[in-house]
Image: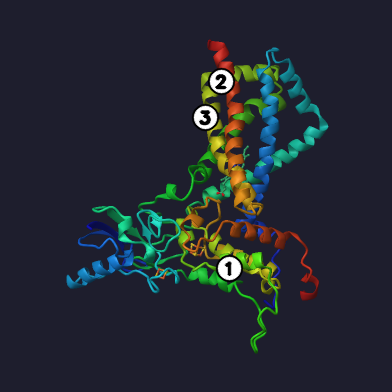
Amino acid sequence: MATTTSPTKGAWLHTTVGRKVLMAATGLFLITFLVVHLAGNLLLLRNDGGAAFNAYAEFMSTNPLIRVLEIGLFAGFVVHIYQGLYFIFTERRARPKGYTLNQASANSNIFSRTMRLSAVVVLVFLVVHLRHFFVEHRLLGTPLTMYESCKIAFENPYYSAFYVLSMVLLAFHLAHGFYSGFQTLGLVLNKRIERLLKWGAAGFAFLVPLGFAIIPMYFLLSKYL
Amino acid sequence: MHFTLRVWRQKNAQDTGHFEIYDIDGVSPDASFLEMLDVLNEKLIKQGREPVAFDHDCREGICGSCGMFINGRAHGPLRNITTCRLYMRHFRDGETITIEPFRAKSFPVIKDLVVDRSALDKIVQAGGYISVNTGSSPDANSIPVPKPAADLAFTYAACIGCGACVAACKNASAMLFTAAKVAHFAMLPQGQPERRQRVKRMVAQMDKEGFGHCTNTGACAVECPAKIPLTAIAQLQRDFIWANLSPDPHAASSS
Ligand code: HEM
Ligand code: SF4
Ligand code: FES
Protein backbone atom coordinates (compact mmCIF):
# COMPACT_ATOMS: atom_id res chain seq x y z
CA MET A 1 0.00 0.00 0.00
CA ALA A 2 2.67 2.43 -1.01
CA THR A 3 0.41 5.01 -2.57
CA THR A 4 -2.19 6.47 -0.30
CA THR A 5 -5.25 7.62 -2.14
CA SER A 6 -6.70 10.58 -0.35
CA PRO A 7 -10.42 10.70 -1.11
CA THR A 8 -12.30 13.93 -0.57
CA LYS A 9 -12.98 14.74 3.05
CA GLY A 10 -16.27 13.30 4.21
CA ALA A 11 -16.44 10.74 1.39
CA TRP A 12 -16.48 8.02 4.03
CA LEU A 13 -19.94 9.16 5.07
CA HIS A 14 -21.22 8.06 1.65
CA THR A 15 -20.12 4.46 2.14
CA THR A 16 -22.73 2.03 3.46
CA VAL A 17 -20.81 1.81 6.74
CA GLY A 18 -20.51 5.60 7.05
CA ARG A 19 -24.22 6.07 6.39
CA LYS A 20 -25.05 3.55 9.07
CA VAL A 21 -22.72 5.29 11.55
CA LEU A 22 -24.73 8.48 10.96
CA MET A 23 -27.98 6.58 11.43
CA ALA A 24 -26.78 4.98 14.64
CA ALA A 25 -25.52 8.21 16.17
CA THR A 26 -28.70 10.11 15.32
CA GLY A 27 -30.93 7.15 16.23
CA LEU A 28 -29.42 6.83 19.71
CA PHE A 29 -29.74 10.59 20.16
CA LEU A 30 -33.41 10.39 19.19
CA ILE A 31 -33.84 7.68 21.82
CA THR A 32 -32.74 10.08 24.58
CA PHE A 33 -35.22 12.59 23.23
CA LEU A 34 -38.02 10.00 23.47
CA VAL A 35 -37.37 9.63 27.21
CA VAL A 36 -37.60 13.40 27.81
CA HIS A 37 -40.69 13.66 25.64
CA LEU A 38 -42.39 10.83 27.54
CA ALA A 39 -41.57 12.34 30.92
CA GLY A 40 -43.35 15.54 29.86
CA ASN A 41 -46.33 13.74 28.35
CA LEU A 42 -46.99 11.80 31.52
CA LEU A 43 -47.99 15.14 33.11
CA LEU A 44 -51.15 14.82 31.01
CA LEU A 45 -52.28 12.09 33.37
CA ARG A 46 -52.34 14.46 36.35
CA ASN A 47 -55.82 15.36 37.42
CA ASP A 48 -55.28 19.15 37.40
CA GLY A 49 -57.12 20.20 34.27
CA GLY A 50 -53.83 20.40 32.40
CA ALA A 51 -52.13 23.05 34.57
CA ALA A 52 -48.85 21.16 35.03
CA PHE A 53 -48.74 20.03 31.40
CA ASN A 54 -49.44 23.52 30.05
CA ALA A 55 -46.72 25.00 32.24
CA TYR A 56 -44.31 22.36 30.90
CA ALA A 57 -45.36 23.05 27.29
CA GLU A 58 -44.91 26.77 27.88
CA PHE A 59 -41.41 26.19 29.28
CA MET A 60 -40.44 23.95 26.35
CA SER A 61 -41.54 26.47 23.74
CA THR A 62 -39.92 29.54 25.34
CA ASN A 63 -36.72 28.47 27.11
CA PRO A 64 -33.69 29.52 25.00
CA LEU A 65 -31.65 26.43 25.90
CA ILE A 66 -34.50 24.18 24.75
CA ARG A 67 -34.63 26.26 21.54
CA VAL A 68 -31.04 25.32 20.76
CA LEU A 69 -31.58 21.66 21.63
CA GLU A 70 -34.62 21.70 19.38
CA ILE A 71 -32.45 22.64 16.41
CA GLY A 72 -30.19 19.68 17.22
CA LEU A 73 -33.23 17.43 17.48
CA PHE A 74 -34.53 18.62 14.14
CA ALA A 75 -31.13 18.03 12.51
CA GLY A 76 -30.98 14.57 14.09
CA PHE A 77 -34.34 13.67 12.58
CA VAL A 78 -33.39 15.05 9.17
CA VAL A 79 -30.14 13.04 9.01
CA HIS A 80 -31.72 9.85 10.37
CA ILE A 81 -34.69 10.05 8.01
CA TYR A 82 -32.55 11.00 5.00
CA GLN A 83 -30.25 7.99 5.49
CA GLY A 84 -33.22 5.79 6.34
CA LEU A 85 -34.98 6.72 3.11
CA TYR A 86 -31.76 6.09 1.20
CA PHE A 87 -31.68 2.51 2.48
CA ILE A 88 -35.41 2.08 1.95
CA PHE A 89 -35.17 3.19 -1.67
CA THR A 90 -32.09 1.09 -2.42
CA GLU A 91 -33.59 -1.97 -0.74
CA ARG A 92 -33.48 -4.34 -3.70
CA ARG A 93 -30.25 -3.12 -5.25
CA ALA A 94 -27.96 -5.77 -3.78
CA ARG A 95 -30.43 -8.62 -4.36
CA PRO A 96 -32.60 -7.87 -7.40
CA LYS A 97 -33.86 -11.46 -7.59
CA GLY A 98 -35.04 -12.75 -4.22
CA TYR A 99 -35.38 -16.30 -2.93
CA THR A 100 -38.39 -18.43 -3.77
CA LEU A 101 -38.29 -19.91 -0.28
CA ASN A 102 -36.71 -17.96 2.56
CA GLN A 103 -36.78 -19.06 6.21
CA ALA A 104 -35.42 -15.83 7.63
CA SER A 105 -37.15 -16.42 10.96
CA ALA A 106 -34.66 -19.23 11.63
CA ASN A 107 -31.71 -16.86 11.80
CA SER A 108 -32.99 -13.41 12.81
CA ASN A 109 -35.80 -11.80 14.77
CA ILE A 110 -38.82 -10.07 13.27
CA PHE A 111 -37.92 -6.63 14.64
CA SER A 112 -34.61 -6.53 12.80
CA ARG A 113 -36.24 -7.65 9.56
CA THR A 114 -39.03 -5.06 9.68
CA MET A 115 -36.96 -1.93 10.40
CA ARG A 116 -38.01 -0.34 7.13
CA LEU A 117 -41.71 -1.03 7.71
CA SER A 118 -41.58 0.35 11.26
CA ALA A 119 -39.60 3.33 9.95
CA VAL A 120 -42.27 4.23 7.39
CA VAL A 121 -45.09 4.03 9.95
CA VAL A 122 -43.12 6.14 12.45
CA LEU A 123 -42.40 8.65 9.67
CA VAL A 124 -46.10 8.99 8.77
CA PHE A 125 -46.91 9.32 12.46
CA LEU A 126 -44.27 12.01 12.83
CA VAL A 127 -45.76 14.08 9.98
CA VAL A 128 -49.31 13.84 11.38
CA HIS A 129 -48.04 14.50 14.90
CA LEU A 130 -46.03 17.59 13.92
CA ARG A 131 -48.92 18.92 11.85
CA HIS A 132 -51.24 18.54 14.79
CA PHE A 133 -49.10 19.98 17.57
CA PHE A 134 -46.02 21.79 16.27
CA VAL A 135 -47.55 23.48 13.21
CA GLU A 136 -50.83 24.29 14.97
CA HIS A 137 -49.25 25.82 18.07
CA ARG A 138 -45.91 27.18 17.04
CA LEU A 139 -46.56 28.28 13.47
CA LEU A 140 -50.29 28.96 13.27
CA GLY A 141 -50.68 30.14 16.87
CA THR A 142 -53.94 28.43 17.73
CA PRO A 143 -55.78 29.95 20.74
CA LEU A 144 -56.11 26.47 22.29
CA THR A 145 -53.82 25.47 25.15
CA MET A 146 -51.57 22.45 24.54
CA TYR A 147 -53.70 20.43 26.97
CA GLU A 148 -56.87 21.27 25.05
CA SER A 149 -55.24 20.24 21.78
CA CYS A 150 -54.22 16.90 23.28
CA LYS A 151 -57.68 16.35 24.75
CA ILE A 152 -59.39 16.99 21.39
CA ALA A 153 -56.95 14.72 19.58
CA PHE A 154 -57.02 11.86 22.06
CA GLU A 155 -60.80 11.86 22.52
CA ASN A 156 -61.03 11.16 18.80
CA PRO A 157 -61.03 7.34 18.56
CA TYR A 158 -59.47 7.36 15.08
CA TYR A 159 -56.59 9.56 16.16
CA SER A 160 -56.04 7.50 19.29
CA ALA A 161 -56.13 4.20 17.38
CA PHE A 162 -53.60 5.56 14.91
CA TYR A 163 -51.47 6.79 17.81
CA VAL A 164 -51.48 3.44 19.60
CA LEU A 165 -50.74 1.52 16.40
CA SER A 166 -47.82 3.84 15.68
CA MET A 167 -46.46 3.18 19.16
CA VAL A 168 -46.57 -0.56 18.50
CA LEU A 169 -44.45 0.00 15.40
CA LEU A 170 -42.16 2.36 17.31
CA ALA A 171 -41.69 -0.49 19.80
CA PHE A 172 -40.63 -2.69 16.87
CA HIS A 173 -38.18 -0.01 15.69
CA LEU A 174 -36.65 0.34 19.14
CA ALA A 175 -36.59 -3.38 19.94
CA HIS A 176 -33.88 -3.77 17.31
CA GLY A 177 -32.65 -0.18 16.91
CA PHE A 178 -31.56 0.24 20.51
CA TYR A 179 -29.13 -2.70 20.27
CA SER A 180 -28.25 -2.14 16.61
CA GLY A 181 -27.15 1.45 17.14
CA PHE A 182 -24.57 0.37 19.71
CA GLN A 183 -23.31 -2.41 17.43
CA THR A 184 -22.96 0.06 14.53
CA LEU A 185 -20.85 2.33 16.71
CA GLY A 186 -18.66 -0.68 17.49
CA LEU A 187 -19.53 -0.69 21.17
CA VAL A 188 -20.78 -4.27 21.49
CA LEU A 189 -17.44 -5.67 22.58
CA ASN A 190 -18.50 -9.14 23.67
CA LYS A 191 -21.39 -11.56 24.12
CA ARG A 192 -22.12 -10.26 27.62
CA ILE A 193 -22.63 -6.68 26.42
CA GLU A 194 -24.68 -8.03 23.53
CA ARG A 195 -27.01 -9.94 25.89
CA LEU A 196 -27.27 -6.97 28.22
CA LEU A 197 -28.12 -4.56 25.40
CA LYS A 198 -30.66 -6.93 23.87
CA TRP A 199 -32.46 -7.27 27.21
CA GLY A 200 -32.21 -3.52 27.73
CA ALA A 201 -33.60 -2.94 24.25
CA ALA A 202 -36.51 -5.30 24.92
CA GLY A 203 -37.39 -3.55 28.18
CA PHE A 204 -36.98 -0.06 26.73
CA ALA A 205 -38.92 -0.89 23.57
CA PHE A 206 -41.77 -2.27 25.66
CA LEU A 207 -41.99 0.40 28.35
CA VAL A 208 -41.43 3.68 26.48
CA PRO A 209 -44.01 3.18 23.68
CA LEU A 210 -46.40 1.74 26.30
CA GLY A 211 -45.96 4.92 28.33
CA PHE A 212 -46.85 7.03 25.29
CA ALA A 213 -49.80 4.80 24.33
CA ILE A 214 -51.39 4.86 27.81
CA ILE A 215 -52.16 8.59 27.46
CA PRO A 216 -54.59 8.51 24.49
CA MET A 217 -56.18 5.39 25.96
CA TYR A 218 -56.67 7.20 29.26
CA PHE A 219 -58.36 10.18 27.57
CA LEU A 220 -60.54 7.93 25.46
CA LEU A 221 -61.61 5.80 28.39
CA SER A 222 -62.33 8.77 30.66
CA LYS A 223 -64.57 10.24 27.97
CA TYR A 224 -66.61 7.11 27.30
CA LEU A 225 -66.68 5.44 30.71
CA MET B 1 -35.49 -42.28 2.34
CA HIS B 2 -37.57 -40.66 -0.36
CA PHE B 3 -37.50 -36.96 -1.33
CA THR B 4 -39.06 -34.63 -3.85
CA LEU B 5 -36.40 -32.18 -5.01
CA ARG B 6 -37.27 -28.77 -6.38
CA VAL B 7 -34.02 -27.68 -8.01
CA TRP B 8 -33.16 -24.36 -9.66
CA ARG B 9 -31.95 -24.91 -13.23
CA GLN B 10 -30.31 -22.10 -15.16
CA LYS B 11 -28.18 -22.61 -18.29
CA ASN B 12 -26.00 -19.54 -17.83
CA ALA B 13 -25.99 -16.01 -16.44
CA GLN B 14 -28.29 -14.77 -19.23
CA ASP B 15 -30.91 -17.50 -18.85
CA THR B 16 -33.87 -16.54 -16.61
CA GLY B 17 -33.86 -19.94 -14.91
CA HIS B 18 -36.67 -22.12 -13.53
CA PHE B 19 -37.35 -24.90 -11.02
CA GLU B 20 -37.42 -28.56 -12.01
CA ILE B 21 -38.95 -31.29 -9.87
CA TYR B 22 -37.15 -34.61 -9.35
CA ASP B 23 -38.17 -37.63 -7.27
CA ILE B 24 -35.38 -39.49 -5.56
CA ASP B 25 -35.72 -42.83 -3.78
CA GLY B 26 -33.59 -45.13 -1.66
CA VAL B 27 -31.43 -42.36 -0.20
CA SER B 28 -29.40 -43.44 2.84
CA PRO B 29 -30.00 -41.30 5.94
CA ASP B 30 -26.22 -41.19 6.32
CA ALA B 31 -25.66 -39.79 2.84
CA SER B 32 -24.42 -36.21 2.84
CA PHE B 33 -26.44 -33.64 0.95
CA LEU B 34 -23.82 -33.54 -1.80
CA GLU B 35 -23.81 -37.35 -2.07
CA MET B 36 -27.58 -37.23 -2.49
CA LEU B 37 -27.07 -34.76 -5.37
CA ASP B 38 -24.42 -37.13 -6.85
CA VAL B 39 -27.00 -39.92 -6.85
CA LEU B 40 -29.50 -37.60 -8.53
CA ASN B 41 -26.95 -36.63 -11.18
CA GLU B 42 -26.06 -40.27 -11.96
CA LYS B 43 -29.73 -40.90 -12.48
CA LEU B 44 -30.06 -37.84 -14.73
CA ILE B 45 -27.02 -38.86 -16.80
CA LYS B 46 -28.44 -42.39 -17.27
CA GLN B 47 -31.62 -40.80 -18.56
CA GLY B 48 -29.55 -38.72 -20.97
CA ARG B 49 -30.42 -35.46 -19.18
CA GLU B 50 -28.17 -32.64 -18.08
CA PRO B 51 -26.83 -33.15 -14.51
CA VAL B 52 -27.33 -30.40 -11.90
CA ALA B 53 -24.23 -28.21 -11.66
CA PHE B 54 -23.11 -27.48 -8.09
CA ASP B 55 -19.85 -26.34 -6.51
CA HIS B 56 -17.88 -28.66 -4.23
CA ASP B 57 -14.32 -29.55 -3.46
CA CYS B 58 -13.12 -30.70 -0.03
CA ARG B 59 -16.44 -32.16 1.16
CA GLU B 60 -15.26 -31.76 4.74
CA GLY B 61 -16.23 -28.20 5.54
CA ILE B 62 -12.95 -26.40 4.92
CA CYS B 63 -12.93 -25.07 1.35
CA GLY B 64 -16.18 -23.09 1.37
CA SER B 65 -17.22 -23.91 -2.17
CA CYS B 66 -20.43 -25.91 -1.57
CA GLY B 67 -22.77 -22.94 -1.09
CA MET B 68 -26.45 -23.36 -1.92
CA PHE B 69 -29.75 -22.25 -0.43
CA ILE B 70 -31.66 -25.26 0.88
CA ASN B 71 -35.25 -24.97 2.12
CA GLY B 72 -34.87 -21.24 2.64
CA ARG B 73 -31.57 -21.37 4.55
CA ALA B 74 -27.95 -20.88 3.50
CA HIS B 75 -26.40 -24.39 3.69
CA GLY B 76 -29.71 -25.90 4.79
CA PRO B 77 -31.68 -26.31 8.01
CA LEU B 78 -28.82 -26.51 10.53
CA ARG B 79 -26.90 -23.61 12.03
CA ASN B 80 -23.19 -23.00 11.42
CA ILE B 81 -22.62 -25.82 8.94
CA THR B 82 -21.58 -26.26 5.30
CA THR B 83 -23.74 -28.13 2.79
CA CYS B 84 -21.18 -30.92 2.53
CA ARG B 85 -21.55 -31.64 6.26
CA LEU B 86 -25.33 -31.72 6.13
CA TYR B 87 -26.81 -35.24 6.17
CA MET B 88 -30.07 -36.54 4.81
CA ARG B 89 -31.12 -37.70 8.29
CA HIS B 90 -31.62 -33.99 9.06
CA PHE B 91 -34.65 -34.07 6.73
CA ARG B 92 -38.04 -35.73 7.11
CA ASP B 93 -38.71 -38.78 4.94
CA GLY B 94 -40.91 -37.75 2.00
CA GLU B 95 -40.05 -34.06 2.43
CA THR B 96 -39.96 -31.65 -0.52
CA ILE B 97 -36.55 -29.96 -0.58
CA THR B 98 -36.17 -26.65 -2.42
CA ILE B 99 -32.63 -25.94 -3.64
CA GLU B 100 -31.67 -22.52 -5.02
CA PRO B 101 -28.36 -20.80 -5.69
CA PHE B 102 -27.09 -18.10 -3.30
CA ARG B 103 -28.80 -14.96 -4.54
CA ALA B 104 -27.05 -11.58 -4.64
CA LYS B 105 -26.31 -9.09 -7.37
CA SER B 106 -22.61 -9.57 -6.61
CA PHE B 107 -22.92 -13.38 -6.96
CA PRO B 108 -24.05 -13.89 -10.59
CA VAL B 109 -25.22 -17.42 -11.38
CA ILE B 110 -22.78 -19.29 -13.62
CA LYS B 111 -24.92 -22.39 -14.00
CA ASP B 112 -27.72 -23.99 -11.96
CA LEU B 113 -26.52 -23.77 -8.34
CA VAL B 114 -23.03 -22.47 -9.12
CA VAL B 115 -22.44 -18.77 -8.50
CA ASP B 116 -19.42 -16.56 -9.11
CA ARG B 117 -18.08 -15.42 -5.73
CA SER B 118 -15.00 -13.62 -7.02
CA ALA B 119 -16.43 -10.36 -5.63
CA LEU B 120 -15.28 -11.67 -2.22
CA ASP B 121 -11.76 -12.19 -3.59
CA LYS B 122 -11.73 -8.58 -4.79
CA ILE B 123 -12.53 -7.38 -1.27
CA VAL B 124 -9.56 -9.38 0.04
CA GLN B 125 -7.33 -8.04 -2.74
CA ALA B 126 -8.26 -4.50 -1.69
CA GLY B 127 -6.63 -4.89 1.72
CA GLY B 128 -6.72 -8.36 3.19
CA TYR B 129 -2.96 -8.78 3.28
CA ILE B 130 0.12 -7.57 5.15
CA SER B 131 3.43 -6.27 3.83
CA VAL B 132 6.45 -8.44 4.66
CA ASN B 133 10.05 -8.46 3.58
CA THR B 134 10.68 -11.76 1.89
CA GLY B 135 13.85 -13.63 2.73
CA SER B 136 14.73 -16.31 5.22
CA SER B 137 11.92 -17.26 7.52
CA PRO B 138 11.88 -15.29 10.79
CA ASP B 139 12.62 -16.96 14.11
CA ALA B 140 9.58 -18.32 15.90
CA ASN B 141 8.19 -15.98 18.53
CA SER B 142 10.32 -13.06 17.37
CA ILE B 143 7.15 -10.98 17.40
CA PRO B 144 5.32 -11.52 20.67
CA VAL B 145 1.50 -11.74 20.44
CA PRO B 146 -0.56 -11.79 23.64
CA LYS B 147 -2.50 -15.04 24.00
CA PRO B 148 -6.01 -13.47 24.02
CA ALA B 149 -5.19 -11.50 20.86
CA ALA B 150 -3.81 -14.61 19.18
CA ASP B 151 -6.95 -16.55 20.09
CA LEU B 152 -9.23 -13.84 18.71
CA ALA B 153 -7.15 -13.52 15.53
CA PHE B 154 -7.52 -17.27 15.10
CA THR B 155 -11.28 -17.07 15.57
CA TYR B 156 -11.55 -14.39 12.89
CA ALA B 157 -9.09 -16.12 10.55
CA ALA B 158 -11.37 -19.16 10.38
CA CYS B 159 -13.52 -17.67 7.59
CA ILE B 160 -13.61 -20.03 4.60
CA GLY B 161 -15.06 -17.49 2.16
CA CYS B 162 -18.21 -19.52 1.53
CA GLY B 163 -20.51 -16.52 1.09
CA ALA B 164 -23.26 -17.87 3.37
CA CYS B 165 -23.24 -14.57 5.26
CA VAL B 166 -24.10 -12.71 2.06
CA ALA B 167 -26.68 -15.31 1.07
CA ALA B 168 -28.46 -15.25 4.43
CA CYS B 169 -28.40 -11.46 4.87
CA LYS B 170 -31.64 -9.69 3.95
CA ASN B 171 -29.54 -6.92 2.40
CA ALA B 172 -26.99 -9.26 0.75
CA SER B 173 -24.29 -7.57 2.83
CA ALA B 174 -20.74 -8.92 2.93
CA MET B 175 -20.01 -7.34 6.30
CA LEU B 176 -19.26 -10.52 8.24
CA PHE B 177 -16.82 -11.70 5.57
CA THR B 178 -15.08 -8.32 5.31
CA ALA B 179 -15.10 -7.82 9.07
CA ALA B 180 -13.55 -11.25 9.67
CA LYS B 181 -10.52 -10.19 7.62
CA VAL B 182 -10.29 -6.69 9.10
CA ALA B 183 -10.64 -7.96 12.67
CA HIS B 184 -8.17 -10.80 12.11
CA PHE B 185 -5.37 -8.40 11.15
CA ALA B 186 -6.42 -5.78 13.69
CA MET B 187 -5.51 -8.26 16.44
CA LEU B 188 -1.95 -8.84 15.29
CA PRO B 189 1.19 -6.66 15.33
CA GLN B 190 1.81 -7.59 11.68
CA GLY B 191 -1.53 -6.08 10.76
CA GLN B 192 -0.87 -2.64 12.25
CA PRO B 193 1.06 -0.78 9.49
CA GLU B 194 -1.81 -1.01 6.99
CA ARG B 195 -4.61 -0.97 9.52
CA ARG B 196 -6.18 2.39 8.59
CA GLN B 197 -5.90 1.88 4.85
CA ARG B 198 -7.11 -1.71 5.03
CA VAL B 199 -10.46 -0.99 6.60
CA LYS B 200 -11.12 1.98 4.31
CA ARG B 201 -10.21 0.11 1.17
CA MET B 202 -12.04 -3.07 2.01
CA VAL B 203 -15.24 -1.16 2.87
CA ALA B 204 -14.95 0.86 -0.36
CA GLN B 205 -14.46 -2.34 -2.37
CA MET B 206 -17.41 -4.00 -0.63
CA ASP B 207 -19.62 -1.14 -1.77
CA LYS B 208 -18.12 -1.14 -5.24
CA GLU B 209 -18.89 -4.84 -5.67
CA GLY B 210 -22.54 -4.02 -5.00
CA PHE B 211 -23.03 -5.71 -1.62
CA GLY B 212 -25.69 -4.21 0.65
CA HIS B 213 -25.40 -2.50 4.03
CA CYS B 214 -25.50 -4.12 7.45
CA THR B 215 -28.71 -3.97 9.53
CA ASN B 216 -27.20 -6.06 12.34
CA THR B 217 -29.87 -8.76 12.05
CA GLY B 218 -27.22 -11.34 12.94
CA ALA B 219 -28.45 -13.83 10.31
CA CYS B 220 -24.88 -14.13 8.98
CA ALA B 221 -23.38 -15.38 12.24
CA VAL B 222 -26.15 -17.97 12.62
CA GLU B 223 -25.42 -19.46 9.19
CA CYS B 224 -21.62 -18.99 9.15
CA PRO B 225 -19.95 -22.44 9.12
CA ALA B 226 -16.78 -20.92 10.61
CA LYS B 227 -18.74 -19.40 13.51
CA ILE B 228 -17.32 -15.92 12.93
CA PRO B 229 -18.85 -13.88 15.79
CA LEU B 230 -20.57 -10.50 15.40
CA THR B 231 -17.76 -8.94 17.45
CA ALA B 232 -15.83 -8.97 14.15
CA ILE B 233 -18.33 -6.46 12.76
CA ALA B 234 -18.05 -4.30 15.89
CA GLN B 235 -14.27 -4.31 15.38
CA LEU B 236 -14.64 -3.23 11.75
CA GLN B 237 -17.00 -0.44 12.81
CA ARG B 238 -14.55 0.84 15.44
CA ASP B 239 -11.63 0.69 13.03
CA PHE B 240 -13.60 2.40 10.28
CA ILE B 241 -14.76 5.25 12.51
CA TRP B 242 -11.28 5.65 14.01
CA ALA B 243 -9.51 5.49 10.61
CA ASN B 244 -11.72 8.26 9.28
CA LEU B 245 -12.01 10.53 12.29
CA SER B 246 -8.60 10.50 13.98
CA PRO B 247 -5.67 12.30 12.34
CA ASP B 248 -3.36 9.94 10.45
CA PRO B 249 0.15 10.26 11.93
CA HIS B 250 1.69 9.31 8.58
CA ALA B 251 -0.48 11.55 6.43
CA ALA B 252 2.01 14.44 6.27
CA SER B 253 5.01 12.34 5.21
CA SER B 254 3.14 10.43 2.49
CA SER B 255 1.71 13.43 0.66
C1 HEM C 1 -38.11 8.65 17.43
C2 HEM C 1 -37.90 8.12 16.31
C3 HEM C 1 -36.78 7.19 15.93
C4 HEM C 1 -35.80 6.60 16.69
C5 HEM C 1 -35.56 6.75 18.19
C6 HEM C 1 -34.99 5.80 15.80
C7 HEM C 1 -33.90 5.05 16.19
C8 HEM C 1 -33.20 4.20 15.37
C9 HEM C 1 -32.04 3.45 15.75
C10 HEM C 1 -31.33 3.52 17.10
C11 HEM C 1 -31.68 2.68 14.68
C12 HEM C 1 -30.51 1.71 14.62
C13 HEM C 1 -29.38 2.27 13.81
C14 HEM C 1 -28.37 1.20 13.49
O1 HEM C 1 -28.74 0.10 13.08
O2 HEM C 1 -27.18 1.46 13.63
C15 HEM C 1 -32.61 2.94 13.63
C16 HEM C 1 -32.61 2.31 12.39
C17 HEM C 1 -33.39 2.72 11.33
N1 HEM C 1 -34.23 3.81 11.30
FE1 HEM C 1 -34.86 4.87 12.90
N2 HEM C 1 -35.48 5.89 14.53
C18 HEM C 1 -36.57 6.74 14.56
C19 HEM C 1 -37.34 7.14 13.50
C20 HEM C 1 -37.11 6.78 12.19
C21 HEM C 1 -37.81 7.33 11.06
C22 HEM C 1 -38.91 8.39 11.10
C23 HEM C 1 -37.32 6.72 9.96
C24 HEM C 1 -37.78 7.01 8.55
C25 HEM C 1 -37.08 6.95 7.49
C26 HEM C 1 -36.31 5.76 10.41
C27 HEM C 1 -35.60 4.89 9.60
C28 HEM C 1 -34.76 3.91 10.04
C29 HEM C 1 -34.28 2.80 9.23
C30 HEM C 1 -34.63 2.52 7.77
C31 HEM C 1 -33.43 2.05 10.04
C32 HEM C 1 -32.72 0.76 9.68
C33 HEM C 1 -31.50 0.97 8.86
C34 HEM C 1 -30.93 -0.36 8.45
O3 HEM C 1 -31.47 -0.99 7.53
O4 HEM C 1 -29.94 -0.80 9.02
N3 HEM C 1 -36.19 5.84 11.76
N4 HEM C 1 -33.52 3.88 14.05
S1 SF4 D 1 -17.82 -15.04 7.41
FE1 SF4 D 1 -18.61 -17.16 7.63
S2 SF4 D 1 -20.40 -17.20 6.26
FE2 SF4 D 1 -19.18 -15.43 5.65
S3 SF4 D 1 -17.81 -16.15 4.02
FE3 SF4 D 1 -16.67 -16.36 5.96
S4 SF4 D 1 -17.09 -18.48 6.61
FE4 SF4 D 1 -18.64 -18.00 5.06
S1 FES E 1 -17.15 -28.83 -0.22
FE1 FES E 1 -15.57 -27.77 0.87
S2 FES E 1 -16.70 -26.79 2.44
FE2 FES E 1 -18.22 -28.02 1.49
Q: Is residue B143 left or right of residue B253?
A: left
How far apart, in angstroms, are the residues tagged by discs 1 and 2?
55 Å
Q: Is residue A145 above or below residue B22?
A: above
SS under mark 2: helix
Pick out the residue farthest to the bottom.
Answer: B136
Name the spot of residue A144 as percent of width and height, x first: 69, 17
Pick out the residue farthest to the right.
Answer: A64
The chain under label 1 reads: B
The residue to which callout 2 is attached is A217
Give the residue type at disc 2.
Answer: Met
Name the spot of residue A72 as percent of width and height, x first: 74, 41
Co-location on one chain, circles 3 and 1: no
Q: Nearer the viewer, residue B185 or B14?
A: B185
Give the residue type at disc 1.
Answer: Phe
From the image, state whether disc 3 or disc 1 is nearer to you. Answer: 1
Decide: few, some or many residues near mark 3? Use Cα within 10 Å; few <14, some 14-19, many ≥20.
some
Would residue A127 be seen by someone viewing this image from the given angle?
A: no
Would residue A38 be seen by someone viewing this image from the given angle?
A: yes
The residue to which callout 1 is attached is B154
Q: Tag 3 or tag 2, which sits nearer the N-term? A: 3
